């Protein structure tokens, strides 16, 4: 399998054979077991990292492996991402960013829940469902923050009902793009609340 990796507008295509992914499943299981116990993500301790955050953690390690020309670790991290996010389209690495700034771009899927990696979870367990449209609209407004500026970047947050905490979007350089991504998150949360 080929994993497309973008760093500073440079495209790398990493070849990760399926046989390699099969052979590395024990290693991937150990990674998952380590993360099951919680993980330090930048300045925040995350009790139970979700699938996409785990992929971002692996993407951050992939960036380090590429910087250090550690091909074995790089292939393992690429294999982990492909194994855990099978609909991954590409990985966009931000050398100056933090773990949550590493983006896992996914192919669109039929259930409408496909998110660009790094995007906060929209339809996690614990979300109230079967709300009326009016109630869902009010709840979505509470669950998805407005866009805010942090340094030179823009972000928004989405409330995770399962963990009881807020998940931040990745850093977004353009306010209009941040507003569009926030609108998408709001619409997705509204639809999930109505289900």
Image: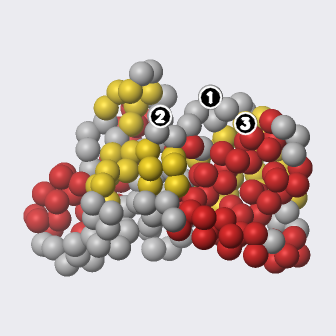
Where is residue 183 drawn, in percent x and y? 33, 47
Report crowding for label 3: few under 14, some 14 to 19, many 20 or more residues within 10 A (C-alpha): few
Secondary structure of the residue carrying numbered label 3: strand
Kindly tell me whether residue 85 is visible in this rendering.
Answer: no
Q: Who's the residue at 59% across and 47% down the image?
A: 103
Q: Is residue 107 left or right of residue 80?
A: left
Q: Who's the residue at 37% across and 50% down the image?
A: 167
Tell me the distance, in whole angstroms, between the alpha carbons under discs 2 and 3.
16 Å
Q: Are marks 1 and 2 in contact (CB under 8 Å)?
A: no
Q: Nearer the viewer, mark 1 or mark 3?
A: 1
Where is residue 54 drawn, in percent x and y? 57, 59
Residue designated by label 2 = 172
Tell me the distance, in whole angstroms, between the alpha carbons under discs 1 and 2.
13 Å
Where is residue 86 drawn, in percent x and y? 66, 70
Report crowding for label 1: few under 14, some 14 to 19, many 20 or more residues within 10 A (C-alpha): few
Secondary structure of the residue carrying numbered label 2: loop
| Front-lying residue, 124 or 12 | 124
Where is residue 39 drawn, in percent x and y? 52, 55
Q: Is residue 68 above or below residue 138?
A: above
Q: Is residue 3 left or right of residue 105?
A: right
Q: Who's the residue at 27% across and 50% down the image?
A: 144
Report crowding for label 2: few under 14, some 14 to 19, many 20 or more residues within 10 A (C-alpha): many
Task: Please report whichever mark, 2 or 3, sits nearer to the chain's N-terminal start.
Answer: 3
Q: Nearer the viewer, mark 1 or mark 2?
A: 1
User: Splitting the image into 4 quarters, where does residue 181 fall?
Assistant: top left
Q: Quadrant of the N terminus?
A: bottom right
Kindly tell me whether residue 141 is visible in this rendering.
Answer: yes
Task: Please report whichever mark, 1 or 3, sits nearer to the chain's N-terminal start.
Answer: 3
Task: Please report whichever mark, 1 or 2, sits nearer to the chain's N-terminal start.
Answer: 1
Residue designated by label 1 = 96
Residue designated by label 3 = 7
Q: Is residue 163 left or right of residue 1?
A: left
């Amino acid at each position: 399998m080929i994993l497309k990796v973008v760093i500073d507008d440079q495209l790398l295509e990493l070849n990760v054979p399926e046989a390699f992914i099969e052979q590395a499943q024990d290693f991937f299981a150990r990674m998952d077991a380590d993360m099951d116990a919680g993980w330090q993500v930048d300045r925040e301790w995350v009790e139970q990292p979700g699938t996409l955050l785990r992929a971002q953690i692996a993407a951050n390690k992939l960036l380090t492996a590429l910087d250090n020309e550690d091909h074995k670790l790089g292939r393992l991290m690429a294999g982990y991402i492909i194994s855990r996010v099978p609909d991954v389209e590409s990985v966009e690495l931000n050398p100056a960013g933090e773990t949550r700034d590493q983006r896992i771009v996914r192919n669109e899927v039929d259930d409408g829940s496909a998110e660009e990696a790094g995007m906060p979870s929209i339809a996690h367990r614990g979300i109230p469902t079967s709300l009326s449209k009016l109630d869902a609209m009010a709840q979505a407004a509470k669950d998805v923050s407005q866009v805010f500026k942090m340094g030179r970047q823009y972000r928004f947050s989405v409330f995770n009902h399962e963990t009881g905490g807020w998940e931040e979007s990745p850093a977004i350089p353009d306010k209009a793009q941040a507003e569009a991504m926030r609108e998408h998150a709001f619409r997705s949360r509204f639809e999930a609340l109505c289900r």
